[in-house]
Amino acid sequence: MKGEIWTLMFVATVQPLLTIGRQTEDLSPQHEITWGRPNSETAYFDDDTDMNVTAVVGKQARLPCRVINLDKKDVSWIRQRDLHILTVGILTYTSDDRFKVFHPEDSDDWYLEISPVTFRDAGVYECQVSTSPKIFLPVSLAVEVQQARINGPKEVFIQNGSTIKLMCVVNTHSENVGQVTWFRDSAELDDSRG
């Protein structure tokens, strides 16, 4: 058949399911989260892992991933927005030296550390295990700026020599706020009386 072009088309549909407890969600064909204890030989994620992390700009973000029964498999961290491979095992595969993996010896933990964190780092990161099929755990990173505010009205009028009580509220998800410094007319106050 001279001059004819034949096209052969192959179409396949794959719809794997993600199972978390009793809920199911559709996922891409090559990924699946494995929770709990399927059997003693299969790698799986610890179901107590916090999948939402909040960090303050300029501080350290530590994203958790605990893999049980890893055996000789590799743990990788992938940035989901651009599918950039950040780490494989304890090796870092990015030129951005703010990223590194922290794996305490003889533990099941594989933390992705970002320091100092920026707003651009916010998003979803995947902890992947090189099983077949590959399993992954998405961890969402929110980044916020640490802000301080003084409760009450903007202006307060008091008599000279009177005492005023001001309360500073600092929003942060960190346990350690750091040092809080008070200023009056751009001058740092060095005692409680100002």
Image: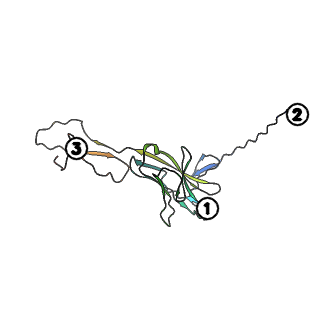
Q: Is residue 76 above or below residue 2?
A: below
Q: Position of residue 39 (x, y in %)?
A: 61, 63
Of 105 and 150, which appears nearest the observer? 105
Q: Which mark is residue 96?
A: none
Q: CA distance from mark 3 to mark 2?
A: 88 Å
Q: Which mark is residue 2?
A: 2
Check if mark 1's residue and mark 2's residue have beta carbons within 8 Å. Answer: no
* 191 with respect to 58 (left or right): left
Q: Amino acid at mark 2?
A: Lys
* 50 with respect to 174 (left or right): right
Secondary-structure class at tag 2: loop
Q: Position of residue 146 (x, y in %)?
A: 35, 45
Check if mark 3's residue and mark 2's residue have beta carbons within 8 Å. Answer: no
Q: Amino acid at mark 1?
A: Thr
Which residue was labeled with disc 3? 183
Q: Which mark is residue 42?
A: 1
Q: Amino acid at mark 3?
A: Phe
